[in-house]
Image (cartoon, rainbow, N blue to C red):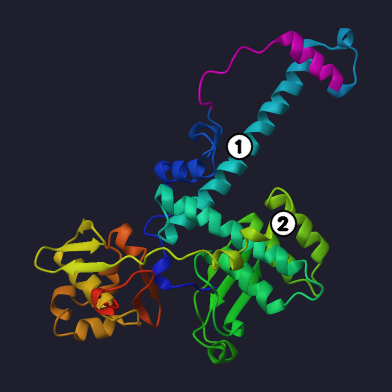
Amino acid sequence: MATSQSDACSSNEPTPDIRHEIVRAHGRPRESKAIGSFRPISKPSPIDRKQLRAAVAAITQTPEEELSEAAVDKVLVKVKKSAIVTGNLLGNHLDGVVAHRKSIGCTSEQEVADYIDLERRVLVSLYSESAKPSPSPTVLLKLALRYSLDARKEIEGDIQRFDLRRRPTGWEIIEYSSPALKIAGVDMPGRLITNVFKVTILDFLHCETPPFFQVLTFLERLLEGVPNKKESLECLTLKPSSPVPVIRVELDKDVVWIDDEPAGVNKEVAYFVDAVAAANGKWISGGKIKKSEKHGLMVGARPDRVAKRVPSQVRKFIEAKGGKGFRLQGAQYPDQMILP
């Protein structure tokens, strides 16, 4: 589906630093995760030929005394090749995860850890719905889309505005601004989902009769057991809400404040953030920003380009969507604050 146009990442090549944040957030040592191709972290220990011969004899069900050294080496080569293939598959999968996190602006250690927790909650909610006697197709698809696109964003509105098309390498998901445009066959760009877990879930849900036993089995493997309902999205909303950050902009100093944390920016970015924040959580288009007497001259003719230069710690509070523009989300502007 086409998610927001601004979700596109400026670079498709994942960086080692972001890989490490994802690996660390999963609770594994940095060095334990395959990155791309098979590369030993350190010099391997010498192979114990005696143990190797015993293992090969057990695998091939051949008496040790009948095993030639050539036969042992042949098995060893196969094992090494298999390890390289497995390492590459894991590395490629991780690269895809990294590219997705970058595309949605989720790159810091805390952002990655929070995202992984929320992604799990989406899967637990999907499990809970699938386990019902009569699961709702709409609820299931909304959860599957949320898991596939951005676990932080609830899929709202008419689900019929989404067009899902099976491709050889995955699912292409296209989001229209309204179901009418979808019916009219308007050509829109989509997002190709190739992550094997996301593709499998979408495959299940698009069966004529979804095999819910297989869905539950798959999710239990993915979640490493039967999940606790307390881990679902529904229970997350019951938690006491944390204070909403306040965004302030000092236009004369080119500084954006998130509560008491400053972020130095250039003049264009400062005026852009101020324009979006001043809209009080409502959508403001790039065209409206350009026409603004206060902000237009400083932001310039391409607010969309300026948006890409907003620091990540500020950008995570700004939602962008093609056809609508930008809005402040998850934070408040001083004018929105309710004073005692």
Residue 266 image offset from top left, x and y in percent: 16, 62
Please tell me whether residue 41 belongs to the stretch shown in magenta.
yes
Mark 2–mark 1 Cα distance, whole angstroms, equals 24 Å
Residue drawn where x is 44% and y is 73% of the image:
4
Identify the residue shown where x is 9% and y is 67%.
252
Mark 1 residue crowding within 10 angstroms, few (<14) / some (14–19) / many (20+)? some
Q: Which residue is drawn at 24% across and 74% down?
A: 334
Q: Residue 264: within the magenta?
A: no
Q: Is residue 256 left or right of residue 222?
A: left
Q: Which mark is residue 2?
A: none
Indicate left or right for 186 with 167 as reference: left
Write down the quadrant of residue 124 in the picture: bottom right
Snapshot quadrant of residue 265: bottom left
Disc count in the image? 2
Q: In which quarter of the image is the N terminus?
A: bottom right
Q: Nearer the viewer, residue 200 or 133?
A: 133
| Quadrant hosting residue 26 | top right
Is the residue under label 1 in contact with that under label 2 (CB below 8 Å)? no
Q: How crowded is mark 2: few (under 14 residues within 10 Å), some or many (20 or more)?
A: many
**Kind of residue indicated by mark 2:** Leu
Q: Is mark 1 on a helix, strand or loop?
A: helix
Give the residue pinned by disc 2: 219
Q: Above or below — where is 160 with respect to 253?
A: below
Relative image position of residue 152 (x, y in whole percent): 50, 65
The residue labelled by disc 1 is 87
Span colored in magenta: 40-58
Nearest the eye: 29 or 301: 29
In percent of the image, x 70 and y 24: which residue is there? 77
Q: What residue type is labelled 1?
A: Gly
- Foreground residue among 155 and 202: 155
